[in-house]
Image: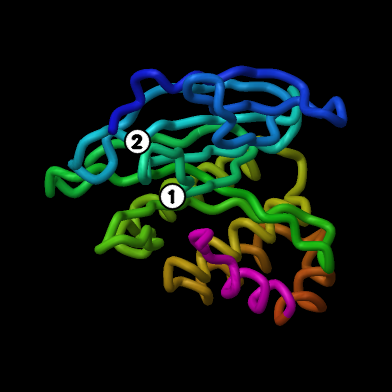
Protein backbone atom coordinates (compact mmCIF):
# COMPACT_ATOMS: atom_id res chain seq x y z
CA UNK A 1 0.00 0.00 0.00
CA UNK A 2 1.35 3.47 -0.88
CA UNK A 3 0.44 7.04 -0.10
CA UNK A 4 -1.10 7.34 -3.58
CA UNK A 5 -4.81 7.96 -3.39
CA UNK A 6 -4.56 9.31 0.14
CA UNK A 7 -5.90 12.84 0.44
CA UNK A 8 -5.09 15.42 3.10
CA UNK A 9 -7.34 18.39 3.81
CA UNK A 10 -6.84 21.29 6.19
CA UNK A 11 -10.40 21.81 7.43
CA UNK A 12 -12.45 22.49 10.53
CA UNK A 13 -14.01 19.62 12.44
CA UNK A 14 -17.57 19.49 13.76
CA UNK A 15 -16.62 21.76 16.67
CA UNK A 16 -14.95 24.32 14.42
CA UNK A 17 -11.39 23.39 15.40
CA UNK A 18 -8.78 23.31 12.60
CA UNK A 19 -7.54 19.82 11.73
CA UNK A 20 -5.64 17.95 9.06
CA UNK A 21 -7.90 15.19 7.78
CA UNK A 22 -6.59 12.05 6.07
CA UNK A 23 -9.08 10.42 3.70
CA UNK A 24 -9.04 7.74 1.01
CA UNK A 25 -11.86 7.48 -1.50
CA UNK A 26 -13.92 9.75 0.72
CA UNK A 27 -13.42 7.59 3.83
CA UNK A 28 -12.08 9.45 6.85
CA UNK A 29 -9.01 7.71 8.26
CA UNK A 30 -7.48 10.17 10.72
CA UNK A 31 -7.73 13.75 12.00
CA UNK A 32 -4.86 15.71 13.54
CA UNK A 33 -5.27 19.00 15.42
CA UNK A 34 -3.45 21.64 13.38
CA UNK A 35 -3.97 25.39 13.37
CA UNK A 36 -1.23 25.82 10.78
CA UNK A 37 0.51 23.30 8.54
CA UNK A 38 4.15 24.33 8.09
CA UNK A 39 5.60 21.17 6.53
CA UNK A 40 4.21 18.23 4.59
CA UNK A 41 6.67 15.97 2.79
CA UNK A 42 7.67 12.33 2.32
CA UNK A 43 10.83 11.32 4.18
CA UNK A 44 12.89 8.14 4.38
CA UNK A 45 13.32 6.92 7.96
CA UNK A 46 13.60 3.13 8.05
CA UNK A 47 14.74 2.11 4.56
CA UNK A 48 11.50 0.29 3.79
CA UNK A 49 8.77 1.24 1.34
CA UNK A 50 6.72 3.29 1.43
CA UNK A 51 8.51 6.34 2.73
CA UNK A 52 7.16 7.98 5.87
CA UNK A 53 5.20 11.22 5.85
CA UNK A 54 6.48 14.23 7.81
CA UNK A 55 3.69 16.55 8.95
CA UNK A 56 4.64 19.63 10.97
CA UNK A 57 1.95 21.77 12.57
CA UNK A 58 2.05 24.98 14.57
CA UNK A 59 -0.31 26.79 16.92
CA UNK A 60 0.74 30.16 15.51
CA UNK A 61 3.67 32.51 15.04
CA UNK A 62 4.95 31.91 18.58
CA UNK A 63 3.28 28.60 19.32
CA UNK A 64 4.86 25.23 19.81
CA UNK A 65 5.53 23.24 16.69
CA UNK A 66 4.64 19.57 16.50
CA UNK A 67 6.65 17.41 14.11
CA UNK A 68 4.65 14.26 13.41
CA UNK A 69 5.89 11.28 11.42
CA UNK A 70 3.51 8.72 9.94
CA UNK A 71 3.84 5.34 8.30
CA UNK A 72 1.17 3.28 6.57
CA UNK A 73 -0.23 0.31 8.47
CA UNK A 74 -2.83 -1.75 6.60
CA UNK A 75 -3.48 1.21 4.34
CA UNK A 76 -4.04 3.66 7.19
CA UNK A 77 -1.67 6.37 8.46
CA UNK A 78 -0.16 5.49 11.85
CA UNK A 79 1.92 7.91 13.87
CA UNK A 80 5.37 6.54 14.67
CA UNK A 81 7.01 9.62 16.16
CA UNK A 82 6.17 13.02 17.63
CA UNK A 83 8.65 15.74 18.56
CA UNK A 84 7.71 19.14 19.96
CA UNK A 85 10.01 22.10 19.26
CA UNK A 86 9.84 25.86 19.63
CA UNK A 87 11.63 26.85 16.46
CA UNK A 88 10.89 24.06 13.99
CA UNK A 89 14.58 23.23 13.76
CA UNK A 90 14.47 19.47 13.17
CA UNK A 91 16.68 17.90 10.53
CA UNK A 92 16.54 14.40 9.06
CA UNK A 93 20.07 13.39 8.11
CA UNK A 94 22.47 10.44 8.42
CA UNK A 95 24.89 11.67 11.10
CA UNK A 96 26.92 8.54 11.78
CA UNK A 97 27.30 7.19 8.25
CA UNK A 98 25.39 3.94 8.81
CA UNK A 99 23.04 4.62 5.92
CA UNK A 100 20.03 5.39 8.13
CA UNK A 101 19.01 8.93 9.03
CA UNK A 102 18.89 10.38 12.51
CA UNK A 103 16.48 13.11 13.55
CA UNK A 104 18.21 16.02 15.25
CA UNK A 105 17.48 19.50 16.51
CA UNK A 106 16.75 21.35 19.73
CA UNK A 107 13.89 20.86 22.14
CA UNK A 108 12.79 23.12 24.96
CA UNK A 109 11.15 22.27 28.26
CA UNK A 110 9.53 24.75 30.60
CA UNK A 111 10.32 24.11 34.26
CA UNK A 112 7.27 25.32 36.17
CA UNK A 113 9.06 25.25 39.51
CA UNK A 114 11.80 27.53 38.15
CA UNK A 115 9.73 29.60 35.69
CA UNK A 116 12.41 29.22 32.99
CA UNK A 117 12.90 27.26 29.79
CA UNK A 118 15.69 24.73 29.39
CA UNK A 119 16.77 24.11 25.80
CA UNK A 120 18.87 21.12 24.85
CA UNK A 121 20.08 19.34 21.72
CA UNK A 122 18.29 16.16 20.70
CA UNK A 123 19.42 13.35 18.41
CA UNK A 124 17.09 10.41 17.79
CA UNK A 125 18.09 7.12 16.14
CA UNK A 126 15.91 4.21 15.09
CA UNK A 127 16.97 1.12 17.03
CA UNK A 128 14.87 -1.88 16.20
CA UNK A 129 11.35 -0.54 16.01
CA UNK A 130 11.81 2.25 18.53
CA UNK A 131 13.33 5.71 18.35
CA UNK A 132 15.94 6.25 21.05
CA UNK A 133 17.55 9.38 22.43
CA UNK A 134 21.23 9.03 21.49
CA UNK A 135 22.24 12.64 22.08
CA UNK A 136 24.93 11.58 24.54
CA UNK A 137 26.79 10.04 21.60
CA UNK A 138 27.19 13.52 20.10
CA UNK A 139 29.01 15.53 22.81
CA UNK A 140 29.91 18.24 20.31
CA UNK A 141 26.24 19.23 20.25
CA UNK A 142 26.41 20.10 23.94
CA UNK A 143 29.71 21.93 23.55
CA UNK A 144 28.35 24.03 20.69
CA UNK A 145 25.18 24.88 22.64
CA UNK A 146 27.18 25.88 25.73
CA UNK A 147 29.44 28.05 23.58
CA UNK A 148 26.37 29.83 22.14
CA UNK A 149 25.03 30.59 25.62
CA UNK A 150 28.43 31.84 26.80
CA UNK A 151 28.68 34.06 23.75
CA UNK A 152 25.29 35.55 24.65
CA UNK A 153 26.57 36.21 28.19
CA UNK A 154 29.67 37.96 26.84
CA UNK A 155 27.48 40.25 24.77
CA UNK A 156 25.09 41.16 27.61
CA UNK A 157 25.55 43.49 30.55
CA UNK A 158 24.96 40.71 33.05
CA UNK A 159 24.17 36.99 33.12
CA UNK A 160 20.50 36.27 33.82
CA UNK A 161 18.79 33.20 35.30
CA UNK A 162 17.91 31.72 31.91
CA UNK A 163 21.55 31.85 30.83
CA UNK A 164 22.77 30.40 34.13
CA UNK A 165 20.19 27.60 34.00
CA UNK A 166 21.03 26.58 30.44
CA UNK A 167 24.80 26.76 30.79
CA UNK A 168 24.73 24.71 33.98
CA UNK A 169 22.11 22.26 32.66
CA UNK A 170 23.94 21.62 29.40
CA UNK A 171 27.22 21.21 31.29
CA UNK A 172 25.53 18.70 33.59
CA UNK A 173 24.25 16.62 30.66
CA UNK A 174 27.67 16.71 29.00
CA UNK A 175 29.40 15.38 32.13
CA UNK A 176 30.97 18.71 33.10
CA UNK A 177 28.72 19.75 36.00
CA UNK A 178 31.54 21.28 38.06
CA UNK A 179 32.72 23.41 35.16
CA UNK A 180 29.17 24.65 34.58
CA UNK A 181 28.66 25.52 38.26
CA UNK A 182 32.05 27.26 38.38
CA UNK A 183 31.20 29.34 35.31
CA UNK A 184 27.88 30.45 36.84
CA UNK A 185 29.62 31.40 40.11
CA UNK A 186 32.19 33.52 38.27
CA UNK A 187 30.18 35.03 35.45
CA UNK A 188 26.65 35.29 36.85
CA UNK A 189 27.01 37.17 40.17
CA UNK A 190 23.55 38.76 39.99
CA UNK A 191 21.81 35.39 39.98
CA UNK A 192 24.33 33.41 42.06
CA UNK A 193 22.07 33.41 45.12
CA UNK A 194 19.12 32.18 43.02
CA UNK A 195 21.30 29.51 41.43
CA UNK A 196 22.70 28.30 44.76
CA UNK A 197 19.21 28.10 46.25
CA UNK A 198 17.80 26.21 43.25
CA UNK A 199 20.79 24.14 42.12
CA UNK A 200 19.42 20.86 43.48
CA UNK A 201 16.06 21.53 41.86
CA UNK A 202 17.71 22.43 38.54
CA UNK A 203 19.81 19.27 38.65
CA UNK A 204 16.72 17.14 39.27
CA UNK A 205 14.73 18.69 36.41
CA UNK A 206 17.59 18.57 33.91
CA UNK A 207 18.40 14.94 34.64
CA UNK A 208 14.78 14.02 34.06
CA UNK A 209 14.47 15.71 30.67
CA UNK A 210 14.33 12.96 28.10
CA UNK A 211 12.60 12.00 24.91
CA UNK A 212 9.76 9.52 25.20
CA UNK A 213 8.30 7.97 22.07
CA UNK A 214 4.48 7.78 22.06
CA UNK A 215 3.24 4.19 21.95
- Expressed as whole percent of the image width and height from the top left, the position of residue 49 reads 21, 36
| Residue at image coords 60%, 73% | 208
Q: Quadrant of residue 164?
A: bottom right
* Residue named by callout 1: 80
In magenta stretch: residue 210: yes
Could you tell whether 178 is left or right of 48 in the image?
A: right
Q: Is residue 117 above or below residue 132?
A: above
| Residue at image coords 59%, 64% | 169
Task: Name the outermost residue toward the left.
Answer: 98
Closer to us: 142 or 121: 121
* Residue named by callout 2: 52
Q: In what element is the residue under mark 2?
A: strand
Q: Which residues are magenta?
A: 201-215
- Expressed as whole percent of the image width and height from the top left, the position of residue 68 reads 51, 39
Q: Quadrant of residue 187?
A: bottom right
Closer to us: 70 or 149: 70
Task: Name the outermost residue toward the right.
Answer: 15
Task: Name the outermost residue toward the bottom.
Answer: 200
Q: Is residue 37 above or below residue 211?
A: above
Could you tell whether 162 is left or right of 8 in the image?
A: right
Q: Quadrant of residue 36?
A: top right
Closer to us: 117 or 91: 91
For marks 2 and 1, give the CA distance. Answer: 9 Å
Q: Is residue 131 above or below residue 44?
A: below
Amino acid sequence: MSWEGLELEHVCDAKGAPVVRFTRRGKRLLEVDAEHVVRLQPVELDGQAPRELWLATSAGAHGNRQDLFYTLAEGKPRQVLEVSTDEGNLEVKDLDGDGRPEISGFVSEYFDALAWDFERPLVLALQGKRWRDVTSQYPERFREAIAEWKLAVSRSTDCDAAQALNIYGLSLLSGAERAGASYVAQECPYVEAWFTENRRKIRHHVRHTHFSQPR
